[in-house]
Image: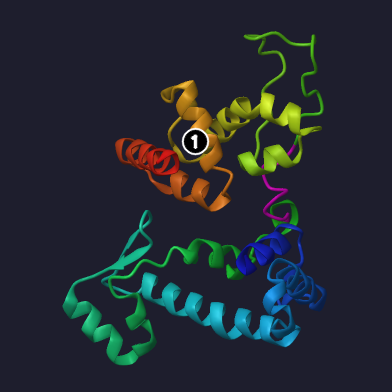
Amino acid sequence: MMMDLYIQAVERGKRSDSGFQSSTHKHATRELGKNFPEVAHCITNKKVKSKLSQGFKRDYDAFLALKNASGFGWDDITGVATASAEVWDCYLVSHPYARQFWGSPFPEFHKLDLIFGDIRATGENARSISQQGLQLNANLNTPGEAQPGDHTNPAPRFASPTAYLSQSHSKKDAIADAVDGLVGFLQTSRNQSEHFHAEEASQHEALSAFKIFRSDIIGQIFTSIREKDLRLGWLHQQIDEMNN
């Protein structure tokens, strides 16, 4: 949950090149206390900041260096850094802290990358994560204005299904338009990175996938898999795990 709170802060533009504002740490401390009242007295602003800067940041920096080191590969699905035993042995001589990642998945990397990843964009590209790709169509269809097959008003594009739902006027309307939101998300992903398009999924699969893609991290993993068959296989596996 702590990672999610800081990701939300990044999306709201609360992180600068120098780090997070003090108000962000205080907000995270309050929210953690609310959600874990039994240990709220132990959750202090100082401990939260320490966990972020000395715990999460240390793990992120260590894994990022490992991921980019010569001789290492990267499995997007499992979050495992791959290399031969010889490469590992050589690397660990000078980077002993990285031993924890040998053969072990580190799925938190995707979230930590959102929190600590470099901010290099300027101008129009410096918008927050939520704002990027989340330009709502001003002419969003209302009942009676557009019929199926009417392409005069292009479907709006969304950064993710989660962002789409957050912009809906009501929960009822959001549920009714959920499939269309997922289609827009998947089609946008395909246009940008030659990824899977929504027509390849049945309506039932789309509804199930929509539930999965409520996690932006899952969406990022999905769109990062370039091999179509592998991508579809991974999606079906996630749907099966969710339904079991």
Q: Main secondary structure of the magenta part?
A: loop
* Residue 115 position by quadrant: bottom right
- Which quadrant does the C terminus fall into? top left
- Where disc 1 sits, the SS reads helix
- Residue in view at x 74 percent, y 11 percent: 146
Q: Residues within 10 Å of mark 1 (few under 14, many from 20)?
A: many
In the rendering, at what x and y percent does residue 151 appear? Answer: 66, 13
The answer to which of 112 and 47 lies nearer the viewer is 47
In the rendering, at what x and y percent does residue 189 appear? Answer: 52, 38
> Considering only vertical position in the picture, is 212 above or below 168?
below
Say whether residue 68 is left or right of residue 216.
Answer: left
The answer to which of 206 and 16 lies nearer the viewer is 206
> Considering only vertical position in the picture, is 201 above or below 10?
above
Say whether residue 50 is left or right of residue 70.
Answer: right
- Which quadrant does the N terminus fall into? bottom right
Say whether residue 89 is left or right of residue 221.
Answer: left
In the rendering, at what x and y percent does residue 209 appear? Answer: 49, 35
> Considering only vertical position in the picture, is 23 above or below 140?
below
- Residue in view at x 71 percent, y 31 percent: 174
Say whether residue 193 is left or right of residue 79.
Answer: right
- Residue in view at x 68 percent, y 24 percent: 176
Three-letter code, disc 1 = Ala
- Residue in view at x 45 percent, y 42 percent: 242
In the picture as drawn, the residue positioned furthest to the front comes out as 38
The answer to which of 138 and 105 lies nearer the viewer is 105
Residue that badge 1 annotates: 209
In the rendering, at what x and y percent does residue 171 appear? Answer: 75, 33
- Magenta span: 127-135
